[in-house]
Amino acid sequence: MLYVGSVEIYPKDTTQRGMSASNLSLQTVKSVFYPLKSAETVTAVFNAFGDDNLLSLPGQKFELPMTVKYTDANYWNLFRFRFVEGKPYSKEEFASGIRNAVIDASTAKGFSAGTPPSAKPCC
């Protein structure tokens, strides 16, 4: 397994000092890694950093801090999960830009209040 967590960027002019580090963009993953012929599966996973990762439902004042990961559809082919309800999103759903949330069982219990989480609006 090859894991690329970030990239370091240096100026072309070697007389200048400086460096920047960043996560790879989805565009970079699509243009550099998706076409790899030697890889069985390539996936993109981006961690959302910051203090604004709060999960709430419409009409509720309750907000729960969350660890958020943005993934592509191949994520579900590389890592295996047991879905209590629902299914992973497809390549077509990912490409369309539709917003889907996949939550774990303990988070679902905290928000369900008797209604299955899949029956509630998302994102």
Image (tube, rainbow, N blue to C red):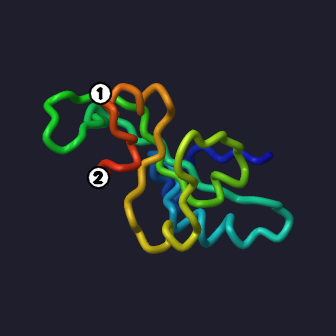
Q: Which residue is farthest front?
A: 114
Q: Report crowding for label 1: few under 14, some 14 to 19, many 20 or more residues within 10 A (C-alpha).
A: few
* Disc number for residue 97: none
Numbered disc 2: secondary structure: loop
Depth order, front residue of 30/82: 82
Residue at 81% from the left image edge and 61% from the top image edge: 39
Residue at 72% from the left image edge and 73% from the top image edge: 35
Identify which amino acid the numbered label 2 is placed on: Pro
Residue at 63% from the left image edge and 52% from the top image edge: 75
The residue identified by callout 2 is 121
Depth order, front residue of 50/102: 102
Identify which amino acid the numbered label 1 is placed on: Leu
Residue at 51% from the left image edge and 62% from the top image edge: 26
- The picture places residue 104, in percent across and down from the top left corner, at 50, 34
- The picture places residue 52, in percent across and down from the top left corner, at 26, 36
Whether residue 34 appears in this view of the structure is yes
101 vs 29: above or below: above
113 vs 27: above or below: above
Q: Nearer the viewer, mark 1 or mark 2?
A: 2
- The picture places residue 42, in percent across and down from the top left corner, at 71, 59
Depth order, front residue of 83/56: 83
Depth order, front residue of 115/40: 115
Instruction: Give the quadrant of residue 31.
Output: bottom right
**Residue 72 as seen in the image, left or right of residue 41:** left
Numbered disc 1: secondary structure: strand
**Residue 62 as seen in the image, left or right of residue 72:** left
Counting residues from the start of the chain, the first of labels 1 and 2 encountered is 1
Whether residue 123 appears in this view of the structure is no
- The picture places residue 25, in percent across and down from the top left corner, at 49, 59
Instruction: Give the quadrant of residue 79.
Output: top right
The residue identified by callout 1 is 64
Give the spatial CA distance, label 1 vs label 2.
Answer: 16 Å
